[in-house]
Amino acid sequence: KQEVTQIPAALSVPEGENLVLNCSFTDSAIYNLQWFRQDPGKGLTSLLLIQSSQREQTSGRLNASLDKSSGRSTLYIAASQPGDSATYLCATHSGYSTLTFGKGTMLLVSP
Amino acid sequence: DADVTQTPRNRITKTGKRIMLECSQTKGHDRMYWYRQDPGLGLRLIYYSFDVKDINKGEISDGYSVSRQAQAKFSLSLESAIPNQTALYFCATSDERRVDTQYFGPGTRLTVL
């Protein structure tokens, strides 16, 4: 059974800092890995999706990397802003159309 | 209008009551999912459906049932609610041609007293 772990559980940084969120998974036989953002009272928004054959994906200030052999992914946020404050969830896709989620990292970026 | 809608958005009920949570989508997707999220935990899959005639149990289906009334509608029922079913419930959809991307509704916050 796939298990997804996210570290840290919570992170507080001042505006402008670069930061890294970590995700690890136990079964490397994944189809892809996704990073989601969750805002309070709202659903999940997909940020980045990395296929199993890829090493990284970038979108604006976000960069996600994937090392499938070691079971690790990182989400790098450059020049953080207060609007980045949210919970970030990592999820693996096994190819059976279902996702396995980590518990999330709650990020607070203070002005 | 939102592509994936959930009703109600908030519900407080009592132990033993029957509750139905509804999900509708306008994305034309064939695949729909129900997840629950507990404080400090990730999302866990309850049930999923690949089309109107296909229903599958997820990781935590005990105490729940579902109905796929149409391609666009997927309902989750708690036949006899209990307090540990207090959680945030999310519906999601995906297209069989792009199974790697799921689109989530805004969630239903359910409290069972």
Image: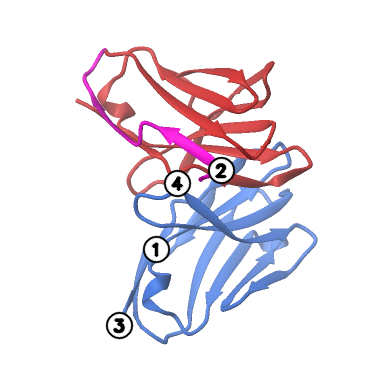
Amino acid type, mark 4: Gly
Gap between marks 2 and 1 measured at Cα:
22 Å
In the image, what residue occupies the spot 59% across and 53% down? Answer: A25
Residue at the far front: name it.
B1
Residue topped by disc 1: A86
Residue topped by disc 3: A111
| In this view, B31 is above or below A95 | above
- On whether disc 4 and disc 1 are found on a single subunit, the reply is no
Gap between marks 3 and 1 measured at Cα:
15 Å
Residue topped by disc 4: B42
In the rendered image, residue B72, in percent from the top left (x then y), is placed at 61, 28
Local packing at callout 1 (Cα closer than 10 Å; few below 14, some 14-19, many 20+) is some
Local packing at callout 4 (Cα closer than 10 Å; few below 14, some 14-19, many 20+) is many
| Chain of the residue under the numbered disc 4 shown in the image | B
Amino acid type, mark 1: Ala
Q: Circle 3 sits in a helix, a strand or a loop, which is it? A: loop
- On whether disc 3 and disc 2 are found on a single subunit, the reply is no
Gap between marks 3 and 2 measured at Cα:
33 Å
Q: Circle 4 sits in a helix, a strand or a loop, which is it? A: loop
Q: Circle 1 sits in a helix, a strand or a loop, which is it? A: strand
